[in-house]
Image (spheres, rainbow, N blue to C red):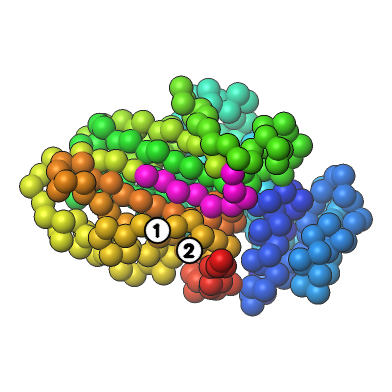
Amino acid sequence: MIKVGIVGGTGYTGVELLRILSTHPEVELTAITSRKEDGLPVADMYPSLRGKVGIAFSSPDKARLTDCDVVFFATPHGVAMAQAPELLAAGVKVIDLAADFRLQDVAQFEKWYGIPHTCQDVLKEAVYGLPELNRDAIKAARVIGNPGCYPTTMQLGFAPLLKAGVIDAGSLIADCKSGVSGAGRKAEIGILFSEASDTFKAYGVSGHRHTPETTEQLQRLSAEPVELLFTPHLVPMIRGMHSTLYAKLKTDISNEALQALFEDAYKDEEFVDVMPFGSHPETRSTRASNMLRLALHRPGNGKTLVILVVQDNLVKGASGQAVQCMNLMFGLAENTGLQHVPVMP
């Protein structure tokens, strides 16, 4: 059994990890940390876990994280980099759901996250945890930087096209929408029900921290310089993400060939569903699952290709993907503990 610790178990990605790992056949939940909730049974805070998670939260100084095989960090940026060296020295693998180990460009990290990177030696060996594009490296990794939710949709939507060289890498556009849970579990005016319900808005239009992360990874797939215009939006729903991606075709290629390009790229990927050309995937078709669905459109059969991508921002966009990485790191079948069917309606 894999002994698992979770640092920051009270937030949305933390409880999503608990939900998934509580029924994972190869996992023993060993430690769940929270300074504020020290001693509180996890199921008292989250009744959905009654009968599934029997342990209590413990403060970080009491939690024996070095006894674990792997520790997930479901914490604000900066926490994982402070604790990773001690855990790695004890033989513990680290999966960070924040941004500490996502960006290899330290200057970009410090610019967008506003804190110094204090663990650059560990960063150099960290592996970006998007299995569909980085599987072999994940298998051998000690440290994983789990991708952001928006970057997951953008990378899997653009990747087959960039690899094939059929689009202009310098004019990528991503128009993305996320449910309010993407902002985390916190008391903040902008995400109160009366503030976020019955409205729709863009944010981060002049620049968003997920842009350099996505560009850095997409550049690995392209021989041309990648330029990405990314605009995120907040929609009045709890969970779910819809990304509408636009790419300019630079070769004479048929719709059938474009569809085949995606089907071939993801034919062995259990968690990527390439729908028939012209389909309209809905966010609810992935709710509470690790599935990402996408579909291609070509308005007027012209030069612009539109890729629609949906996922659950808390699962494939965060905790489910982290468990997917854990499975690879420990030699398990990649889908272990992740075969949840989406919840509809």
Q: Name the residue under label 2.
A: 285
Mark 1 packing: few (<14 Cα in 10 Å), some, or many (20+)?
A: many
Rendered position, 137 above or below 149:
below
Can you name the residue that lies furthest to the bottom here? Answer: 25
Residue for point 55% across, 67% down: 344
Q: Distance between the residues labelled 1 and 2?
A: 7 Å
Regarding mark 2 in the picture, which secondary structure is present there?
helix
Residue placed most toward the observer, 149 or 309: 309
Residue placed most toward the observer, 264 or 189: 189
Question: Contact (CB < 8 A) between labels 1 and 2?
Answer: yes
Q: What stretch is highlighted in magenta?
A: 236-244
Q: What residue type is labelled 2?
A: Ser
Residue 327 showing in the rendered view: no
The N terminus - image quarter: bottom right
Q: Quadrant of residue 266?
A: bottom left
Can you name the residue that lies furthest to the right here? Answer: 39
Can you name the residue that lies furthest to the front here? Answer: 198
Q: What residue type is labelled 1?
A: Pro
Q: Quadrant of residue 228?
A: top left
Residue for point 67% across, 34% down: 195
Numbered mark located on residue 281 in the image: 1
Numbered mark located on residue 271 in the image: none
Regarding mark 1 in the picture, which secondary structure is present there?
loop
243 part of magenta stretch: yes
Residue for point 81% across, 64% down: 47
Residue 306 in the figure: left or right of residue 24 = left
Residue 298 showing in the rendered view: yes
Tell me residue 7's x, y (percent): 73, 50
Tell me residue 261's x, y (percent): 21, 59
* Number of marks: 2
Tell me residue 177's x, y (percent): 48, 42
Mark 2 packing: few (<14 Cα in 10 Å), some, or many (20+)?
A: many
